[in-house]
Image (cartoon, rainbow, N blue to C red):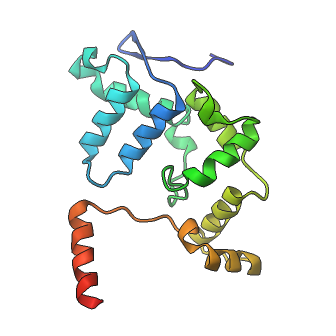
């Protein structure tokens, strides 16, 4: 499979076509960040979006389908390749910063493309470097997650762009209503 991008996944000896455009995967990522969805609902969203004909996959193969889906979403990285770490990127929150950085690497406006394979998108993403806005924000987040001291210019940038640098916590509607209620009492 060297040099080929997967467009299907094998489950129990059968090839199943998958949706490989980066936009479909970003919708899956957004679902995984939705505090209103249970883990089961998040997995269901992933399977229904990724597999073009998920409804035809026999129920007894859903677990394998989920594992293969995660393998695809993780760009073939295995569990041993990944190190658990604090969340540094929020695809939705960072969209205004992320796409200019990806576009710079790609040399084109990727959102204007009719189709872009998820792994190609992630290849561009992994090559983001330099002194761009996204790199600056990500660098600050990385240092803060590791408890490292920010340079003076980074501290100043952080103070002036706190909302951009901090990943916002998402709450369920019930949790947000409770927070709003107590803020009203205190305010």
Quadrant in which the C terminus appears: bottom left
Q: Identify whether 51 is placed above or below 96.
A: above
Q: In the drawing, does residue 58 fall left or right of residue 13?
A: left
Residue 70: percent from left, percent from top: 44, 34
Q: Residue furthest bottom?
A: 186
Q: Residue furthest front?
A: 112
- At 62% from the left and 32% from the top, the residue drawn is 112
Q: How many marks on residues?
A: 0
Q: In the drawing, does residue 69 fall left or right of residue 40?
A: right
Residue 116: percent from left, percent from top: 59, 27
Residue 2: percent from left, percent from top: 67, 18
Q: Identify whether 50 is placed above or below 93.
A: above
- At 31% from the left and 41% from the top, the residue drawn is 42
The answer to which image quadrant residue 109 occupies is top right
Q: In the drawing, does residue 166 fall left or right of residue 31?
A: right
The answer to which image quadrant residue 157 occupies is bottom right
- At 72% from the left and 35% from the top, the residue drawn is 108
Quadrant in which the N terminus appears: top right
Choose between 179 and 96: the one closer to the eye. Answer: 96
Q: Identify whether 131 is placed above or below 185.
A: above
Residue 85: percent from left, percent from top: 52, 58
The answer to which image quadrant residue 143 occupies is bottom right
């Amino acid at each position: 499979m060297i040099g080929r991008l997967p467009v299907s996944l094998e489950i129990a000896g059968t090839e199943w076509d998958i949706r490989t455009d980066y936009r479909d995967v970003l919708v899956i990522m957004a679902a995984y960040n939705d505090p209103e969805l249970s883990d089961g609902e998040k997995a269901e969203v992933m399977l229904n979006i990724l597999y073009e004909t998920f409804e035809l996959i026999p129920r007894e193969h859903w677990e394998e389908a989920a594992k293969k889906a995660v393998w695809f979403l993780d760009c073939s990285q295995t569990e041993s390749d990944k190190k658990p770490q604090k969340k540094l990127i929020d695809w939705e929150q960072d969209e205004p910063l992320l796409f200019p950085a990806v576009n710079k690497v790609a040399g084109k406006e990727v959102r204007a493309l009719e189709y872009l394979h998820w792994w190609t998108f992630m290849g561009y993403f992994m090559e983001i470097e330099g002194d761009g806005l996204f790199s600056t924000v990500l660098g600050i987040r990385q240092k803060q997650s590791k408890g490292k001291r920010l340079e003076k210019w980074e501290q100043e940038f952080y103070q002036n762009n706190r909302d951009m640098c901090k990943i916002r916590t998402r709450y369920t509607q019930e949790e947000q209503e409770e927070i709003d209620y107590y803020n009203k009492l205190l305010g």
